Image (spheres, rainbow, N blue to C red):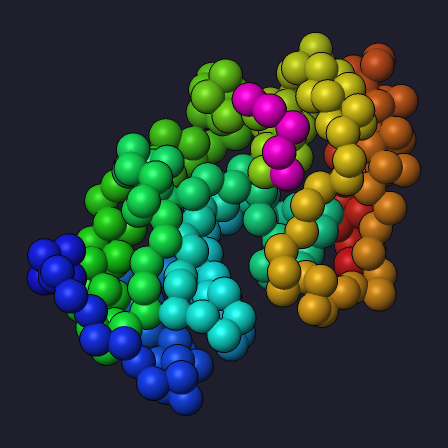
Amino acid sequence: MWEELKVYKQLDKADINPTFKKFGSNLVSLIDGYSIDQTTSLIKLSRQVNQLEQAVFIEKDKGSYNLKVRTSIKPVDFYRRHKFTMLNIIPLGDIMNNHRRTSYPLTQEWNDLAIYLATIIKTEVEHYFQKYNSYDKIIDRRKEIEPKDFGLDNKYELLIYAAIRTKKKDLLNQYLDKKMSRPVMGITQSEYLKPDNNEIDEQTLLQRLKSFALTGDFTNIEKEMAAAFGQN
């Protein structure tokens, strides 16, 4: 069992990338219902539930053995369509109430690590996902999601969508105001490496949404969101 190991055998540097690729393939084979997107530095395991994308991201630091595991809950029709966009970013350690359980070494025991993480995903991560697996649940538990600081964790984007989908005028105006007072959403390293030439102007979109939100005009809000989704 990986979690019982006291000593790990380091990989040769030349084996890190090939092993990372095998690690992703093995991990997705151990959990049902997830698809995989993978680069040389990032593994995304995701599934769709109630028009929400539930995802686990495993990122390998460049030239390093260290793996960082985070989760994301994102609308399927989010206006930024880069596959590695993350919303409501939660480190795995937060879900497990153990901050050390966000990072893991990629070593010769990688197969055991895949089994261990698959078990964690099927139990603790999916239990976490279940708490927020609909827009109604997201609104009901919004206090648990609302950012506690001004970190780039991309939580307001999810709350804005949930307020739109549940037609909560007051909450939508509140979350738009909060979001518009902050910098634009943070993006992943992979997005920096692969910029989208058709990237939407987020501030302009938010301002247009706000103009309709003031009167609770959800018909035009939905039209704006649909148009934004179609641009990318």
Foreground residue among 2 and 14: 14
Vertical placement of 52 versus 20: above or below? above
32 sits to left or right of 145:
left
Question: Residue at the location (76% across, 65% down)?
Answer: 195
Inspect the magenta stretch and tell me whether residue 149 lies in it. yes
Q: Which residues are magenta?
A: 148-152
- The overriding secondary structure of the stretch rendered in magenta is loop
Q: Quadrant of the C terminus?
A: bottom right
Q: Nearer the viewer, residue 223 or 106?
A: 106
Where in the figure is residue 28, as x and y percent of width and height?
A: 33, 67
Which quadrant would residue 47 be assigned to in this image? bottom left
**Side (left or right) of 211 relative to 117:** right
36 inside magenta stretch = no
Question: Is residue 169 shown left or right of residue 96?
Answer: right
Residue in the image at 90% along x and 37% along y: 204
> What residue lies at 33% left-to-right and 74% top-to-bottom?
23
- Which quadrant of the figure contains the N terminus? bottom left
Residue 29 drawn above or below residue 57: below
Closer-to-camera residue (52/153)? 153
Numbered circles on residues, count: 0
